[in-house]
Image (cartoon, rainbow, N blue to C red):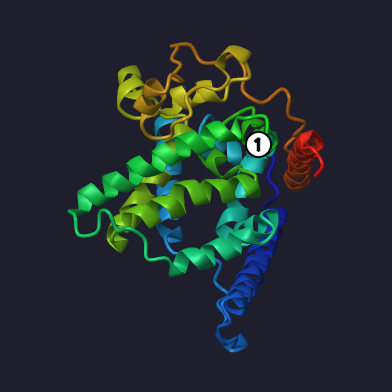
Amino acid sequence: MRHRPFRFLLLLAALFGAGALMTAALEAARRLLTRAPLDLASLPFSPFEEGAGLMLMVVGAMLLVEAAWTGWAPSSLGRLSDEGHLATRSDLLWFLIEVSGVGIALMVVASAGLMLAFETAFADAEGWRLVAGLPLPVQVFALILLGDFAQYWCHRALHSRWLWPIHAMHHAAEELTVLSTFRSHPLENVLTRIATGFLPLLLLGPDPEALAWAMVGAAFASCLTHSALPMPGWVERWVLVGPHLHLLHHSAEARHHDRNFAIVFPWLDRLFGTLLWQAAPPAQLGAPDAAYDTRQPLADALRAYGLVARRWRGFLSRAAGRVPAP
């Protein structure tokens, strides 16, 4: 097992420093976009978004519980601390990118600024407030249910040939850890954030407390599905998506592709005909058609963005060629 603590600490300091500067820059851009007064002295330099603390607590608790259950070596913590596990290096880096605030800036860049404009418009939208005033458990369940429904269809879209190159970054991992949920292309994060975050909030208009609990539930479900914790098979097939069901989704075998898209409720896959269950684990994980080696994750992200851009450019060019000239 090899450790490089000073190199890690240097990376951590660089990411959080960049995150602080990017947070202030994005807030300045947002104020300019809305023509609000720009006071440089009042710009926030904290990269933590609202709810980030809850997410970190869930991730930390899941890491500790998994290590206590499975033992150190096979646990996410054991493999994340060993530089011999190349796939976990990317998991750890993308997790640090997310919590440092750099991830939000990458999302804005990946969406050519549309993410910032969308967030600004969303902040001013009143919404339908369909669950406002209902009991707290009802609001939380409605948020998680609608979020998972939206995530299911967004996930299926990411498996289409038009978006697969960016989602393949997540599937390129040949082993999973609790932090694998953070291993996602910035453009994928934009699409997922809109589908599973903004739209449910706009429709439901929940109370802040309900939103906080729903965020805890979503973070728990996502970390659980990428962990090594055991769950009864009947629970995974009917009640709650577990690690084994999601492991099949990450299988490199062609017969397992495009299955088990849900993150929380397995009956969504059952309802739409995409549920796959087998007791045996897949022989190999990963995305054989994706040229990601996990040693240069940022370069991989740029490469994936270029692949998607070229694919859409080719499609639009062909479509324009079929349109008769006026």
In the picture, the quarter occupied by the N terminus is top right
Q: Is residue 210 left or right of residue 91?
A: left
Q: Position of residue 33 (x, y in %)?
A: 61, 75
Residue pictured at 43% horizontal, 34% vertical:
263
Q: Nearer the viewer, residue 4 or 220?
A: 220
> Is residue 315 visible to us here?
yes
Secondary structure beneath dot 1 equals loop
Residue topped by disc 1: 163
Residue pictured at 34% horizontal, 44% vertical:
144
Q: Nearer the viewer, residue 15 or 112?
A: 112
Relative vertical location of residue 215 with respect to residue 267 in this rendering, above or below: below
In the picture, the quarter occupied by the C terminus is top right
Q: Position of residue 148 (x, y in %)?
A: 40, 39
Q: Position of residue 308 (x, y in %)?
A: 73, 40
Q: Is residue 151 left or right of residue 8?
A: left
Residue pictured at 74% horizontal, 44% vertical:
305
Residue pictured at 51% horizontal, 51% vertical:
194
Identity of the residue furthest to the front in this view: 326
> Is residue 85 visible to us here?
no
Q: Nearer the viewer, residue 311 or 78?
A: 311
Identity of the residue furthest to the left in this view: 135
**Which amino acid lies under the numbered mark 1 shown in the image of this protein?**
Leu
Relative vertical location of residue 213 with respect to residue 225 in this rendering, above or below: below
Q: Position of residue 199 (x, y in %)?
A: 43, 52
